[in-house]
């Protein structure tokens, strides 16, 4: 742009306008004052708008969290396993008497032994004030013939024994070796297990034994290291030769794009075809065709689990964006360093496999710019390049390969917000951009 | 002095100047009057952000508020017009710059009217660059256009104004 100081008449115009005044209405102040007072009484419209946006965003997050919780609700066998765990803990606490009747407590021990499988040995069973016979019977059951417990008949016998052996029920002996229904019919003691409780115990056994009775504890903390690559290339799809026509006759080393104040064309003697040059720049920015290499990302991220389902994630990541202006073969490589913040939910966590989904927002700043002299960018240094903001969603799958290490694969889609005039990158042409991340994750617990 | 008194005094002292600032951006008299009032209301609600740095600081602060209020209005209402490039009606080769003396002979109202006759996009760029001392990049960001487009609009506005002033010069 031509320097305004070069035009004396513009300077004179500026001075004249600086002192210009327009007649303000004489009664204007009263109207302004009334509006000021009403503005103070009522919240500003913009604030309401902002609050609405914040509220809507919070509602969306809550809906995502609620949806995640619903999808991730524990299955029946997990519920049984966790309940059994709590009951074992209650039974182990000798100082605090259990709040449940003794028979039910014994049934709970049975369940817990079945649920815990190899993790609860004879030592634990002994602490549960069971008789030696009962202890031996239950400790052996999962190891000797775990599948047998699936059968209601097989399961009912030891459970009835347990109830008889651990309590002073008057008619305990009469229930030995009888099915649950019969035992309930014969036993009129109110402390004896009910038919539904017995059926529940059978259900526990049915559900737990086939899955091995293992209670999975989700990892609370995890640290992941990502190596990521984007997908797609040459997505611009634009090809216009206007630029070539506009450039015809220009020397190859002409600083065509330097039209800033103080630049080549603002200097005396160089500004003859200023209009044409400006037109060329505009044409180029509109029509030139660019090639983009897939963005490459890599970084280190830490993830913190919030309970069983939700997690938050943040870290530091670098991203390299390479662009080439086809017509002139000039290229630019920008390196951004960014901090993403994400929230997500674990969808599946079974055996060694896990699946999760989340949303992520990121801020990145340019830390390095390498470009050819002729690349059409108005930014001569990294400091001038606006920060890059993005938001997106992702879904990921991982497999625990060894001990605490797992490999994961993470497709994602992000929208990049281009503020003001961004440098020519793939995100200018395609703000909504897919990427695929893969990496290794180390879980602390 | 509380903020109401400060602003009442500013209204009395600077009202004419601030209204002229609004008129530079919005040619319609009623709309510029509304924006002028909006600017004062905005100054009242954000008065805690004003830091008194001596003489002239209140004037500068209020001017910036008026400009921002006008830009906000233009972005909302005439964004497409603001961003589009109108057909250039002035032949740049015929626009010889007028003499500074000719400009000095013009009345302030005449100058403001000439500026008000410019197309909205060119007028906004010209005002921001010449009177508010925004940089080319700041204008591009504020209006959401390319730097090249800023340069072109400034050039067109300059040529149009030059031709108007020269026409006035010939008439007189």
Image: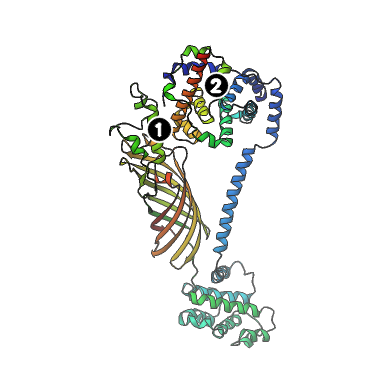
Residue nearest the observer in this picture, A174 or B120: B120
Q: Are marks 1 and 2 on the same chain?
A: no
At 61% from the left and 47% from the top, the residue drawn is: A55
Q: Is residue A269 above or below residue A428?
A: above
Q: Is residue A138 left or right of residue A372?
A: right
Asked whether A142 or A60 is in front, the reply is A60
Q: Which mark is residue A13?
A: none
Seen in the picture, residue A391 relative to A92 is either above or below; the reply is above
Q: Quadrant of the rendered structure where residue B151 is?
A: top left
Q: Is residue A12 left or right of residue A296?
A: right
Question: Mark 2: which secondary structure?
Answer: helix
- Mark 2 nearby-residue class (10 Å; few <14, some 14–19, many ≥20): some
Residue A249: percent from the left, percent from the top? 30, 32
The outermost residue toward the left is A252
Q: Quadrant of residue A17?
A: top right
Q: Quadrant of the C terminus of chain A?
A: bottom left
User: In the rendered structure, the residue with mark 1 lies on which chain?
Assistant: A
Q: Is residue A380 above or below residue A201?
A: above
Percent x, y for residue B100? 47, 13
Is residue A103 at all visible to an observer of this figure?
yes
Name the chain under label 2.
B
| Residue plotted at (60% across, 18% down) | A21
Q: Is residue B94 above or below residue A166?
A: above
Q: Is residue A378 visible?
A: no
Q: Which one is in front, B151 or A355?
A: B151
Residue denoted by label 2? B114
Residue farthest to the front, as pictured: B171
Q: Residues within 10 Å of mark 1 (few under 14, many from 20)?
A: some
Where is residue A333 drawn, in percent x and y? 34, 42
Q: Residue at x 50, y 35 (%)?
A: B84
Q: According to the image, label 1 marks what residue? A: A279
Residue A114: x, y in percent? 52, 76
């Amino acid at each position: 742009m031509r320097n305004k100081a070069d035009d004396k008449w513009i300077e004179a115009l500026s001075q004249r306008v600086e002192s210009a005044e327009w007649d303000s209405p004489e009664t204007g102040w009263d109207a302004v004052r009334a509006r000021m007072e009403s503005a103070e009484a009522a919240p500003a419209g913009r604030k309401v708008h902002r609050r609405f946006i914040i509220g809507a965003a919070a509602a969306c997050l809550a809906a995502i969290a609620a949806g995640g919780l619903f999808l991730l609700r524990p299955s029946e066998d997990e519920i049984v396993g966790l309940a059994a765990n709590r009951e074992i803990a209650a039974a182990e606490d000798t100082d605090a008497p259990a709040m449940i009747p003794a028979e039910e407590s014994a049934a709970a021990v049975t369940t817990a032994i079945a649920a815990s499988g190899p993790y609860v040995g004879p030592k634990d069973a002994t602490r549960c004030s069971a008789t030696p016979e009962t202890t031996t019977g239950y400790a052996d059951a999962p190891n000797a013939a775990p599948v047998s417990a699936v059968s209601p008949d097989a399961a009912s016998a030891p459970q009835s024994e347990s109830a008889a052996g651990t309590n002073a029920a008057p008619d305990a002996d009469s229930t030995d070796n009888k099915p649950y229904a019969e035992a309930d019919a014969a036993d009129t003691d109110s402390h004896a297990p009910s038919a539904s409780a017995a059926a529940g115990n059978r259900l526990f056994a049915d559900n737990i034994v086939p899955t091995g009775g293992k209670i999975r504890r989700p990892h609370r903390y995890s640290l992941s290291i990502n190596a990521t690559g984007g997908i797609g290339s040459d997505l611009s799809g634009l090809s216009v030769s206007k630029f070539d026509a506009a450039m015809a006759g220009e020397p190859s080393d002409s600083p065509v794009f330097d039209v800033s104040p103080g630049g080549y064309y603002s200097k005396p003697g160089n500004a003859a075809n200023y209009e044409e040059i400006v037109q060329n720049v505009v044409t180029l920015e509109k029509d030139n065709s660019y090639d983009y290499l897939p963005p490459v990302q890599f970084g280190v991220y830490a993830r913190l689990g919030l309970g069983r389902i939700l997690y938050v994630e943040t870290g530091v990541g670098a991203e390299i964006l390479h662009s080439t202006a086809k017509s002139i073969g000039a290229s630019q490589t920008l390196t951004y360093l960014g901090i993403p913040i994400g929230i997500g939910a674990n969808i599946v966590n079974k055996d060694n496999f896990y699946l999760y989904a989340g949303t992520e927002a990121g801020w990145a700043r340019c830390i390095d710019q390498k470009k050819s002299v002729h690349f059409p960018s108005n930014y001569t240094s990294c400091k001038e390049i606006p920060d890059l903001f993005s938001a997106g969603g992702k879904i990921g799958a991982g497999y625990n390969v060894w001990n605490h290490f797992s490999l994961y694969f993470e497709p994602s889609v992000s929208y990049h917000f281009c503020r003001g005039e961004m440098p020519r990158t793939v995100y200018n042409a395609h703000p909504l951009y897919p990427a695929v991340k893969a990496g290794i994750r180390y879980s602390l617990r | 002095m509380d903020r109401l008194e400060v602003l009442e005094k500013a209204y009395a002292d600077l009202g004419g100047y601030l209204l002229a600032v609004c008129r530079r951006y919005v040619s319609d008299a009623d709309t510029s009057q509304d924006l002028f009032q909006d600017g004062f209301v905005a100054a009242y609600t954000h008065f805690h952000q004003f830091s008194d740095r001596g003489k002239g600081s209140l004037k500068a602060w209020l001017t910036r508020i008026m400009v921002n209020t006008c830009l906000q209005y233009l972005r909302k209402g005439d964004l497409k017009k603001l961003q589009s490039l109108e057909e250039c009606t002035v032949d740049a080769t015929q626009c010889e710059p007028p003499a500074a003396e000719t400009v000095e002979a013009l009345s302030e109202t005449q100058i403001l009217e000439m500026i008000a006759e410019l197309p909205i996009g060119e007028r906004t760029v010209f005002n921001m660059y010449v009177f508010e001392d925004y940089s080319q990049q700041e204008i591009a960001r504020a209006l959401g256009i390319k730097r090249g487009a800023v340069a072109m609009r400034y050039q067109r506005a300059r040529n149009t104004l030059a031709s108007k002033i020269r026409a006035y010069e010939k008439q007189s």
